[in-house]
Image: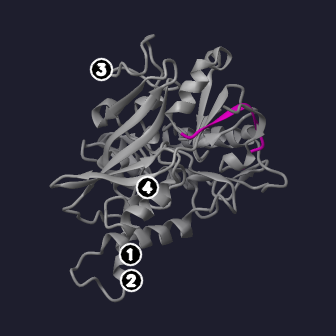
Amino acid sequence: MLVEKNVPLQLSNTFGIVAKALSLVRVAGEADIREVLADPALQAMPKFVLGGGSNIVLTGDVKPLVLKVEIMGKRLVSETAKAWIVEAGAGESWHDLVTWTLQNGYPGLENLALIPGTVGASPVQNIGAYGVELQDRFESLDAVDLTTGQGFTLNAAQCAFGYRDSVFKHKSSTGDSAASTGNPGFGLADKALITRVRFALPKNWKPVLGYADIEKKMAQSSPQPASGAPSALQIYEWICEIRRAKLPDPQVIGNAGSFFKNPTVTAEQCADIIQREPKIVHYPMDDGSIKLAAGWLIDACGWKGKSIGNAGVYERQALVLVNRGGKADPVTGGEVMTLAKAIQTSVYERFGIMLEHEPVVV
Protein backbone atom coordinates (compact mmCIF):
# COMPACT_ATOMS: atom_id res chain seq x y z
CA MET A 1 0.00 0.00 0.00
CA LEU A 2 1.36 3.39 -1.03
CA VAL A 3 0.68 6.39 1.22
CA GLU A 4 1.30 9.51 -0.85
CA LYS A 5 2.38 12.68 0.96
CA ASN A 6 1.55 16.34 0.21
CA VAL A 7 -0.53 15.48 -2.85
CA PRO A 8 -1.78 18.54 -4.81
CA LEU A 9 -5.59 18.57 -4.97
CA GLN A 10 -6.17 21.44 -7.42
CA LEU A 11 -7.05 18.98 -10.20
CA SER A 12 -9.07 16.81 -7.79
CA ASN A 13 -11.70 19.45 -6.96
CA THR A 14 -13.85 21.01 -9.67
CA PHE A 15 -13.53 24.51 -8.20
CA GLY A 16 -9.80 24.29 -8.93
CA ILE A 17 -8.89 25.48 -5.43
CA VAL A 18 -5.22 25.04 -4.51
CA ALA A 19 -4.79 22.72 -1.53
CA LYS A 20 -2.85 19.58 -0.59
CA ALA A 21 -3.72 16.25 0.95
CA LEU A 22 -1.11 15.75 3.66
CA SER A 23 -1.61 11.96 3.27
CA LEU A 24 -3.52 10.15 0.53
CA VAL A 25 -4.30 6.51 -0.30
CA ARG A 26 -5.89 5.46 -3.58
CA VAL A 27 -8.72 2.96 -3.06
CA ALA A 28 -9.28 0.52 -5.94
CA GLY A 29 -11.20 -2.05 -3.85
CA GLU A 30 -12.25 -3.10 -0.37
CA ALA A 31 -8.88 -4.73 0.25
CA ASP A 32 -7.20 -1.31 0.14
CA ILE A 33 -9.44 -0.05 2.95
CA ARG A 34 -8.73 -3.10 5.08
CA GLU A 35 -5.00 -2.61 4.50
CA VAL A 36 -5.31 0.98 5.73
CA LEU A 37 -7.16 -0.18 8.84
CA ALA A 38 -4.54 -2.85 9.51
CA ASP A 39 -1.91 -0.13 9.91
CA PRO A 40 -2.17 1.25 13.49
CA ALA A 41 -1.02 4.76 12.53
CA LEU A 42 -3.39 5.05 9.57
CA GLN A 43 -6.27 3.40 11.43
CA ALA A 44 -6.08 6.08 14.12
CA MET A 45 -6.24 8.98 11.64
CA PRO A 46 -9.50 10.75 10.77
CA LYS A 47 -10.57 9.87 7.22
CA PHE A 48 -11.83 12.01 4.34
CA VAL A 49 -13.42 10.22 1.36
CA LEU A 50 -12.74 11.95 -1.97
CA GLY A 51 -14.52 11.06 -5.19
CA GLY A 52 -14.66 13.47 -8.12
CA GLY A 53 -14.32 16.55 -5.91
CA SER A 54 -17.40 18.11 -7.53
CA ASN A 55 -19.23 18.89 -4.30
CA ILE A 56 -16.53 20.24 -1.99
CA VAL A 57 -15.01 23.58 -1.04
CA LEU A 58 -11.45 23.23 0.24
CA THR A 59 -10.60 25.97 2.74
CA GLY A 60 -7.06 24.71 3.40
CA ASP A 61 -4.85 21.63 3.22
CA VAL A 62 -6.69 18.43 4.13
CA LYS A 63 -5.28 17.01 7.36
CA PRO A 64 -7.33 13.78 7.61
CA LEU A 65 -6.17 10.78 5.59
CA VAL A 66 -7.67 11.23 2.12
CA LEU A 67 -9.17 8.03 0.69
CA LYS A 68 -9.30 8.69 -3.06
CA VAL A 69 -12.01 6.41 -4.45
CA GLU A 70 -10.96 4.79 -7.75
CA ILE A 71 -13.18 1.67 -7.79
CA MET A 72 -14.21 1.08 -11.39
CA GLY A 73 -16.54 -1.18 -13.40
CA LYS A 74 -20.03 -1.13 -14.92
CA ARG A 75 -22.23 -4.18 -15.48
CA LEU A 76 -25.74 -5.57 -15.68
CA VAL A 77 -26.09 -7.59 -12.48
CA SER A 78 -29.52 -9.10 -13.05
CA GLU A 79 -32.99 -8.32 -14.27
CA THR A 80 -36.51 -8.76 -12.98
CA ALA A 81 -39.86 -8.61 -14.75
CA LYS A 82 -39.93 -4.88 -13.98
CA ALA A 83 -36.32 -3.67 -14.12
CA TRP A 84 -32.73 -4.08 -15.16
CA ILE A 85 -30.38 -4.03 -12.17
CA VAL A 86 -27.19 -2.18 -13.14
CA GLU A 87 -24.12 -1.88 -10.90
CA ALA A 88 -21.23 0.59 -11.07
CA GLY A 89 -18.03 1.09 -9.09
CA ALA A 90 -17.96 4.14 -6.84
CA GLY A 91 -15.07 5.68 -8.76
CA GLU A 92 -16.86 5.71 -12.12
CA SER A 93 -17.86 9.07 -13.61
CA TRP A 94 -21.59 9.61 -13.05
CA HIS A 95 -22.17 10.99 -16.55
CA ASP A 96 -20.23 8.11 -18.12
CA LEU A 97 -22.55 5.69 -16.31
CA VAL A 98 -25.66 7.50 -17.58
CA THR A 99 -24.27 7.38 -21.13
CA TRP A 100 -23.38 3.69 -20.82
CA THR A 101 -26.84 2.69 -19.57
CA LEU A 102 -28.54 4.35 -22.52
CA GLN A 103 -26.07 2.90 -25.02
CA ASN A 104 -26.93 -0.55 -23.66
CA GLY A 105 -30.71 -0.05 -23.73
CA TYR A 106 -31.34 0.60 -20.02
CA PRO A 107 -33.33 3.88 -19.74
CA GLY A 108 -34.14 5.76 -16.57
CA LEU A 109 -31.13 7.95 -15.75
CA GLU A 110 -31.35 10.29 -18.74
CA ASN A 111 -32.71 13.27 -16.74
CA LEU A 112 -29.57 13.08 -14.58
CA ALA A 113 -27.13 13.44 -17.48
CA LEU A 114 -24.08 15.71 -17.12
CA ILE A 115 -24.29 15.96 -13.32
CA PRO A 116 -20.61 16.14 -12.31
CA GLY A 117 -19.03 13.75 -9.83
CA THR A 118 -18.70 10.04 -9.27
CA VAL A 119 -21.16 7.19 -8.81
CA GLY A 120 -20.14 6.77 -5.17
CA ALA A 121 -21.09 10.36 -4.37
CA SER A 122 -24.52 10.11 -6.02
CA PRO A 123 -26.38 8.46 -3.11
CA VAL A 124 -24.62 10.63 -0.52
CA GLN A 125 -26.15 13.73 -2.08
CA ASN A 126 -29.26 11.99 -3.47
CA ILE A 127 -28.53 13.86 -6.69
CA GLY A 128 -31.45 15.02 -8.78
CA ALA A 129 -32.42 17.10 -11.79
CA TYR A 130 -35.40 17.74 -14.06
CA GLY A 131 -37.94 15.75 -12.08
CA VAL A 132 -35.82 12.67 -11.25
CA GLU A 133 -33.85 11.97 -8.07
CA LEU A 134 -31.37 9.19 -7.50
CA GLN A 135 -33.71 7.58 -4.96
CA ASP A 136 -36.23 7.03 -7.79
CA ARG A 137 -33.78 4.66 -9.51
CA PHE A 138 -31.81 3.33 -6.54
CA GLU A 139 -31.69 -0.39 -5.71
CA SER A 140 -28.91 -0.85 -3.15
CA LEU A 141 -25.27 -0.07 -2.40
CA ASP A 142 -22.22 -1.74 -0.87
CA ALA A 143 -19.98 0.08 1.60
CA VAL A 144 -17.15 -0.60 4.01
CA ASP A 145 -17.04 0.35 7.68
CA LEU A 146 -14.07 2.72 8.14
CA THR A 147 -13.52 1.50 11.69
CA THR A 148 -13.77 -2.27 11.34
CA GLY A 149 -13.25 -2.87 7.61
CA GLN A 150 -16.50 -4.85 7.56
CA GLY A 151 -18.51 -4.69 4.34
CA PHE A 152 -22.27 -4.11 4.41
CA THR A 153 -25.18 -3.44 2.06
CA LEU A 154 -27.91 -0.80 2.36
CA ASN A 155 -31.30 -0.59 0.66
CA ALA A 156 -33.15 2.65 -0.06
CA ALA A 157 -34.92 2.79 3.30
CA GLN A 158 -31.63 2.37 5.17
CA CYS A 159 -30.10 5.20 3.16
CA ALA A 160 -32.79 7.56 4.54
CA PHE A 161 -32.93 9.63 1.37
CA GLY A 162 -34.25 13.18 1.50
CA TYR A 163 -33.90 16.26 -0.67
CA ARG A 164 -30.12 16.34 -1.39
CA ASP A 165 -29.75 14.29 1.76
CA SER A 166 -28.98 10.78 3.02
CA VAL A 167 -27.71 8.89 6.05
CA PHE A 168 -24.18 9.55 4.76
CA LYS A 169 -24.51 13.29 5.48
CA HIS A 170 -25.35 12.90 9.17
CA LYS A 171 -23.10 12.23 12.14
CA SER A 172 -23.80 9.25 14.40
CA SER A 173 -24.92 9.92 17.95
CA THR A 174 -23.81 6.43 19.00
CA GLY A 175 -20.55 4.55 19.05
CA ASP A 176 -21.91 1.68 16.98
CA SER A 177 -20.12 0.45 13.89
CA ALA A 178 -21.28 1.60 10.46
CA ALA A 179 -22.64 -1.86 9.72
CA SER A 180 -25.24 -1.44 12.50
CA THR A 181 -27.72 0.18 10.16
CA GLY A 182 -30.86 -1.15 11.80
CA ASN A 183 -31.06 2.02 13.89
CA PRO A 184 -33.27 4.43 11.88
CA GLY A 185 -31.54 7.44 13.44
CA PHE A 186 -28.08 6.20 12.59
CA GLY A 187 -25.67 8.55 10.80
CA LEU A 188 -22.83 7.35 8.57
CA ALA A 189 -20.92 10.59 7.91
CA ASP A 190 -17.18 9.84 8.11
CA LYS A 191 -17.92 6.23 9.12
CA ALA A 192 -18.27 4.45 5.77
CA LEU A 193 -16.92 4.41 2.23
CA ILE A 194 -19.30 3.45 -0.59
CA THR A 195 -17.74 0.92 -2.97
CA ARG A 196 -20.51 -0.01 -5.44
CA VAL A 197 -24.02 1.24 -6.25
CA ARG A 198 -26.88 -0.61 -7.96
CA PHE A 199 -29.78 0.93 -9.86
CA ALA A 200 -33.17 -0.48 -10.85
CA LEU A 201 -33.89 0.87 -14.34
CA PRO A 202 -37.52 0.39 -15.40
CA LYS A 203 -38.49 -1.84 -18.31
CA ASN A 204 -41.86 -0.08 -18.49
CA TRP A 205 -40.09 3.23 -19.02
CA LYS A 206 -41.97 6.51 -19.32
CA PRO A 207 -40.40 9.91 -20.01
CA VAL A 208 -40.24 12.36 -17.11
CA LEU A 209 -41.16 15.74 -18.58
CA GLY A 210 -42.92 18.74 -17.04
CA TYR A 211 -39.98 21.14 -16.85
CA ALA A 212 -40.19 24.25 -19.05
CA ASP A 213 -36.74 23.70 -20.57
CA ILE A 214 -37.61 20.15 -21.61
CA GLU A 215 -41.05 21.15 -22.93
CA LYS A 216 -39.38 23.88 -24.99
CA LYS A 217 -36.90 21.39 -26.46
CA MET A 218 -39.75 19.03 -27.26
CA ALA A 219 -41.74 21.77 -29.01
CA GLN A 220 -38.68 22.71 -31.07
CA SER A 221 -37.94 19.10 -32.01
CA SER A 222 -38.15 18.34 -35.70
CA PRO A 223 -39.47 15.95 -36.66
CA GLN A 224 -41.80 15.43 -33.72
CA PRO A 225 -41.55 11.96 -32.11
CA ALA A 226 -43.85 9.51 -33.92
CA SER A 227 -45.23 8.20 -30.63
CA GLY A 228 -45.92 11.70 -29.32
CA ALA A 229 -43.34 11.17 -26.57
CA PRO A 230 -39.56 11.53 -26.77
CA SER A 231 -37.22 8.58 -26.33
CA ALA A 232 -34.82 8.28 -23.40
CA LEU A 233 -31.92 9.10 -25.73
CA GLN A 234 -33.69 12.23 -26.98
CA ILE A 235 -34.23 13.43 -23.41
CA TYR A 236 -30.59 12.68 -22.62
CA GLU A 237 -29.45 14.80 -25.56
CA TRP A 238 -31.82 17.64 -24.59
CA ILE A 239 -30.65 17.62 -20.98
CA CYS A 240 -27.03 17.77 -22.13
CA GLU A 241 -27.82 20.73 -24.38
CA ILE A 242 -29.75 22.52 -21.62
CA ARG A 243 -27.05 22.01 -19.01
CA ARG A 244 -24.22 23.03 -21.35
CA ALA A 245 -26.10 26.24 -22.23
CA LYS A 246 -26.79 27.14 -18.59
CA LEU A 247 -23.90 25.74 -16.58
CA PRO A 248 -20.14 26.26 -16.94
CA ASP A 249 -17.88 23.32 -17.77
CA PRO A 250 -15.64 22.79 -14.70
CA GLN A 251 -12.75 22.06 -17.08
CA VAL A 252 -13.09 25.63 -18.38
CA ILE A 253 -14.50 27.59 -15.41
CA GLY A 254 -14.03 26.06 -11.98
CA ASN A 255 -17.28 25.49 -10.06
CA ALA A 256 -19.11 22.97 -7.90
CA GLY A 257 -22.41 22.97 -9.77
CA SER A 258 -25.50 24.20 -7.96
CA PHE A 259 -24.15 25.78 -4.81
CA PHE A 260 -27.41 26.21 -2.89
CA LYS A 261 -30.37 23.93 -2.27
CA ASN A 262 -33.78 25.02 -3.52
CA PRO A 263 -35.62 25.92 -0.29
CA THR A 264 -39.07 24.54 0.52
CA VAL A 265 -41.79 26.55 2.24
CA THR A 266 -45.41 26.01 3.20
CA ALA A 267 -48.19 26.97 0.81
CA GLU A 268 -49.05 29.85 3.16
CA GLN A 269 -45.46 31.14 3.18
CA CYS A 270 -45.34 30.93 -0.61
CA ALA A 271 -48.61 32.84 -0.96
CA ASP A 272 -47.20 35.57 1.28
CA ILE A 273 -44.04 35.83 -0.83
CA ILE A 274 -46.05 35.85 -4.07
CA GLN A 275 -48.00 38.89 -2.81
CA ARG A 276 -44.69 40.75 -2.63
CA GLU A 277 -42.91 39.00 -5.49
CA PRO A 278 -45.50 37.81 -8.08
CA LYS A 279 -42.84 36.50 -10.48
CA ILE A 280 -41.09 34.17 -8.04
CA VAL A 281 -40.37 30.75 -9.59
CA HIS A 282 -41.93 28.00 -7.51
CA TYR A 283 -42.92 24.33 -7.83
CA PRO A 284 -45.69 22.57 -5.86
CA MET A 285 -44.51 19.34 -4.21
CA ASP A 286 -46.45 16.12 -3.62
CA ASP A 287 -46.54 16.70 0.16
CA GLY A 288 -48.21 20.11 -0.22
CA SER A 289 -45.05 22.15 0.34
CA ILE A 290 -43.68 24.53 -2.27
CA LYS A 291 -40.13 24.45 -3.64
CA LEU A 292 -38.67 27.85 -4.51
CA ALA A 293 -35.98 28.34 -7.14
CA ALA A 294 -32.88 29.42 -5.22
CA GLY A 295 -31.33 30.77 -8.41
CA TRP A 296 -34.28 33.13 -8.87
CA LEU A 297 -34.00 34.37 -5.27
CA ILE A 298 -30.27 35.07 -5.72
CA ASP A 299 -30.82 36.79 -9.07
CA ALA A 300 -33.60 38.93 -7.54
CA CYS A 301 -31.10 40.15 -4.96
CA GLY A 302 -28.83 41.35 -7.76
CA TRP A 303 -26.00 38.86 -7.39
CA LYS A 304 -25.81 37.43 -10.92
CA GLY A 305 -22.41 38.28 -12.39
CA LYS A 306 -21.10 39.84 -9.15
CA SER A 307 -17.82 38.81 -7.48
CA ILE A 308 -15.97 38.91 -4.19
CA GLY A 309 -12.28 38.46 -4.86
CA ASN A 310 -11.92 35.61 -7.33
CA ALA A 311 -15.27 34.05 -6.35
CA GLY A 312 -18.12 35.01 -8.64
CA VAL A 313 -21.77 34.29 -9.41
CA TYR A 314 -22.13 32.82 -12.89
CA GLU A 315 -23.71 35.19 -15.42
CA ARG A 316 -26.06 32.57 -16.90
CA GLN A 317 -27.17 30.86 -13.68
CA ALA A 318 -27.14 32.58 -10.30
CA LEU A 319 -27.21 29.22 -8.50
CA VAL A 320 -23.62 28.53 -9.57
CA LEU A 321 -20.55 30.10 -7.93
CA VAL A 322 -17.43 30.09 -10.07
CA ASN A 323 -13.64 30.47 -9.95
CA ARG A 324 -12.93 33.80 -11.67
CA GLY A 325 -9.16 33.48 -11.23
CA GLY A 326 -8.73 30.39 -13.38
CA LYS A 327 -5.77 28.09 -12.83
CA ALA A 328 -3.20 30.88 -12.74
CA ASP A 329 -4.73 32.86 -9.86
CA PRO A 330 -7.37 30.48 -8.47
CA VAL A 331 -10.12 31.30 -6.04
CA THR A 332 -9.61 30.36 -2.41
CA GLY A 333 -12.08 28.44 -0.30
CA GLY A 334 -12.31 31.48 1.96
CA GLU A 335 -13.40 33.69 -0.96
CA VAL A 336 -16.05 31.16 -2.00
CA MET A 337 -17.51 30.98 1.50
CA THR A 338 -17.39 34.77 1.97
CA LEU A 339 -19.43 35.16 -1.23
CA ALA A 340 -21.81 32.38 -0.19
CA LYS A 341 -22.46 34.00 3.20
CA ALA A 342 -23.06 37.40 1.61
CA ILE A 343 -25.64 35.84 -0.72
CA GLN A 344 -27.32 34.03 2.18
CA THR A 345 -27.59 37.32 4.09
CA SER A 346 -29.11 39.15 1.11
CA VAL A 347 -31.72 36.46 0.47
CA TYR A 348 -32.63 36.24 4.16
CA GLU A 349 -33.02 40.00 4.53
CA ARG A 350 -35.29 40.24 1.47
CA PHE A 351 -37.28 37.00 1.62
CA GLY A 352 -36.85 35.71 5.18
CA ILE A 353 -35.38 32.47 3.79
CA MET A 354 -31.96 31.09 4.78
CA LEU A 355 -30.39 29.25 1.86
CA GLU A 356 -28.40 26.08 2.59
CA HIS A 357 -25.26 25.36 0.61
CA GLU A 358 -24.89 21.96 -1.06
CA PRO A 359 -21.10 21.45 -1.13
CA VAL A 360 -19.19 20.02 1.81
CA VAL A 361 -16.83 22.61 3.30
CA VAL A 362 -13.50 21.04 4.21
Residue denoted by label 1: 216
Name which residue type carries label 1.
Lys
- Kindly indicate the quadrant of the structure image that contains residue 21: top right
In this view, the mark in front (4 or 2): 2
Q: Is residue 15 above or below residue 58?
A: below
Q: Position of residue 136 (x, y in %)?
A: 30, 48
Q: How is the image coloured?
A: one colour
Estimate how packed mark 3 is, as few (under 14), some (14 to 19) or many (20 or more) residues with alpha carbons within 10 Å: few
Estimate how packed mark 1 is, as few (under 14), some (14 to 19) or many (20 or more) residues with alpha carbons within 10 Å: few
Marker disc for residue 280: 4
Name which residue type carries label 4.
Ile
Residue nearer the viewer, 330 or 296: 330
Residue 284 lies in the magenta stretch: no
What secondary structure prevails in the magenta region? strand
* Contact flag, marks 1 and 2 (Cβ < 8 Å): yes
Q: Earlier in the sequence, mark 4 or mark 3?
A: 3
